[in-house]
Image (tube, rainbow, N blue to C red):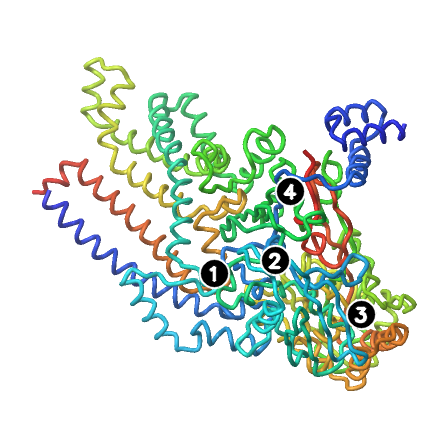
Amino acid sequence: MGQVLKLLVQRIALGLLLLLLVSLLVFVGTEILPGDVAQSILGQAATPTSLANLREELGLNEPAPLRYLSWLGGVLTGDLGTALSNGQDITTQIGLRLGNTLFLAFWAAVVAVPLAILLGLLAVRYRNRWPDKLISGLTLASISLPEFFTGYVLIFFFAVKLRWFPSVATVYDSMSLLEKLNAIALPIAVLVMVVLAHMMRMTRAAILNVMQSAYIETAELKGLSPFKVIFRHAFPNAVAPIVNVVMLNLAYLVVGVVVVEVIFVYPGMGQYLVDHVSKRDVPVVQACGLIFAAVYIGLNLVADIVSIVTNPRLRHPK
Amino acid sequence: MSKELEYFSKKVARGLMDRRAFMGRAAALGVSSTMATGILATAVHAQGPVKGGILKAGLQGASSSDSQDPGTWASDYTTNLGHIWGECLVEVDPTGEIEPRLAESVEASADAKTWSFRIRDGVEFHNGKTLTADDVVATMERHSNEESKSGALGIMTGIDRVVADGQNVIFELSTPNADLPYLISDFHLVIQPGGGKDDPAAGIGTGPYRLVEDQVGVRAVGEKFANYWDGDNRGHADQVETIALNDPTARLAALQSGQVDMINRVEPKVVDLIKRVPGITVQNVAGRGHYVFIMHCNTEPFANNDLRLALKYAINRQELVDKILQGYGSMGNDFPINGSYPLFSDDIEQRTYDPDKAAFHYKQSGHDGPIVLRTSDVAFPGAVDATQLFQQSAAAAGINIEVKREPGDGYWSDVWNVQPFSASYWSGRPVQDQMYSTAYLSSADWNDTRFFRDDFDQLILSARAELDNDKRREIYREAAMIVRDEGGVIVPMFNDFVEATGPRVGGWFKDPNFGFMNNRAIVKCWVES
């Protein structure tokens, strides 16, 4: 177990260093973009006087490295600052948005992950026969269609024609859980269709790989049912690669769903980030960038640890 | 047939018959559902406002960086939301007259240099405070003082001093201005308690609804304010909701699925499809907004008026109205004014596509080689297509336009008002003076055509001080001719505001001042039970 702990500490330290680099890159990136936040806020209505007033008030006249350092100081003391464009506290705003994003990602994962693994197992059980081909065909087709297309098709049939689900997935506090789930039913469906294929194919490939081993043959010769062989004997040894790809897709569900958010008007992090990038609102972009990077790094860390814990050879190296 | 239908429609309006039954009767009488909806809407309007219910509007233009500070409003979403809780001193009504709101009367001195607004008695803010002249003075101050970053700063510059005198607020101007009330109707100038100096984004005003929930860039809810002073005419629904729907397809889907009752900015290309959907009414009105191609009059090759004229004759206006606006608009005449403005002269000859004249003036100019025209998706809806159509019609006259497509990000800071020839738009102003002083006077901040003409400036300033409307009309005609024949702006088209309402909405009327019934559809419309 000491091995795992050491790795954990190492990884977290590296992760923090990565986050620092990410924040630097994001800052430089937003500095390179044309225009600044004052120009973006005032838009076509800007006059030289109002521009100068706004720049002064927002502290944009200070040199860039100084602004970066003062932001960094704030973050290290747990203060993400306030948004330049509307003066709102970033921590509370992100809290709301991140909560929404995680809510959507969670329910999409609850549906997608078990479904993908189950379909993967079924595909192995009936490999190269029609159920396998049907599952692969359908999931590959659904991943090949762009998200906005699937989204609009679902809206047309289920929101406009049948009126089963709302087309606008706006959720807010006063809604009950059931109402919220009803509101996000369509975006969940789209997300599931997008992530299903990747996880399903990986499950299938990983298990098939294990199925070549001699001990599987032994299990089959003992007379175990095919599904039991797959689930009890092959699956545990294929967990590591499956967890890897599951984590990758979970990360996608958190950080990569901006298109779905726009189509279904879901108030998540993606939309929040895009709004503020177009306003050149550096502190918010920084904060979002940090959170997204942290999610990626964190989930990858989990994947590594799971693969070590499930593999005795890695747990007890010679 | 229509008599029977009329009878039934009145029954529905009085709540004695439900809509479904009505549509059934209408179908039995062989009337199309679109027509039946129209008949019903008229009957419901005649019946007068219905109180109660929840009215939901799906609006474009929201962003999670929005604020309730009126000085920052620039988008449809913020402005419409702002007017549920806030009000201005005066408004411009659909006929172009000044409608008193928080000011119950307005008077000017004979030289139009001193204006007095009498503040209405007994108006209450949502925080319980009573509206006073001091609140008005403080509001004006906040939008015009040295530190102001308000969007209204530009229009406040001609005002020297604002003082309270009992229940009156006196505006003293540096130069005479017969249109001052129109400037004060600007949507940024919402009166806030104490001028909003303590907390400009508090969302507290005198409007019909209290802001009870505001999820920035997502959704906001207003609840009826019990002590609202004008409850008979505005604020009919018990609760109103604005939902941020920036994606055009999402807006339409939400209206079609009944999740919102009204939406703004329907794309012209889908209007004909929407019209066929039962229960949905397309609301369009000719406005003052227009799309433009701007040339800098002080930059070669555009410093040559023959070249400017060549380009003006080389654009096919009718084609642009047909293909870019799908007919929802009208041709422009190279000056920024149309029939929606007061004091418009309709006897000015319409300039049309004329490749021969274009070729003639192009030859006169002596210019040779490609002319770079910068465009972008954000310049106006369909700007890139419009630019390419312009390129083709100009090519027929032997003029070589090189289209340079710019990214939407940064277009307003790096291309518009910077590059000598680019696509852009103007949303129009309530009066001619304001449009010209915003973008055509030599001293204007947004003189985006770099048009410096002393005689033109003199005309506009003299019209401003003139209280005789016939004389003003004559002056504006002269000014229009100068811009049309010598200015740097190409105005191919004025765009309509195209919006849509669902089956429950009553009280919608045409208002050319601005989209969504001058940003007040939510407080003026009602929902049927």
Amino acid under disc 4? Ala
Is A190 left, or right, of A161 in this rendering? left
Mark 1–mark 2 Cα distance, whole angstroms, equals 30 Å
Q: Quadrant of the C terminus of chain B?
A: top right
Mark 2–mark 3 Cα distance, whole angstroms, equals 36 Å
x and y, in percent, of residue A90 in the image: 40, 58
Residue drawn at x 38%, y 43% is A102
The mark lying in front, picked from 4 and 3, is 4
x and y, in percent, of residue A290 in the image: 34, 57
Subunit under mark 3: B
Q: Could you tell me if the residues under marks 2 and 3 are in contact, i.e. CB atoms within 8 Å?
A: no
* Residue B99 higher or lower than B227, as above or below: below
Amino acid under disc 3? Asp
Q: Quadrant of the N terminus of chain B?
A: top right
Q: Which of marks 4 and 2 precedes in the sequence?
A: 2
Mark 1–mark 3 Cα distance, whole angstroms, equals 36 Å
- Residue A277: which disc? 1
Is B444 left, or right, of B408 in this rendering? right
Amino acid under disc 2? Gly
Quadrant of res B11? top right
Q: Are marks 4 and 1 on the same chain?
A: no
Q: Which residue is mark 2?
A: B86
Subunit under mark 2: B
Is B134 left, or right, of A260 in this rendering? right
The mark lying in front, picked from 1 and 2, is 2
Subunit under mark 1: A
- Residue B237: which disc? 4
Report the front residue among A269 and B344: B344
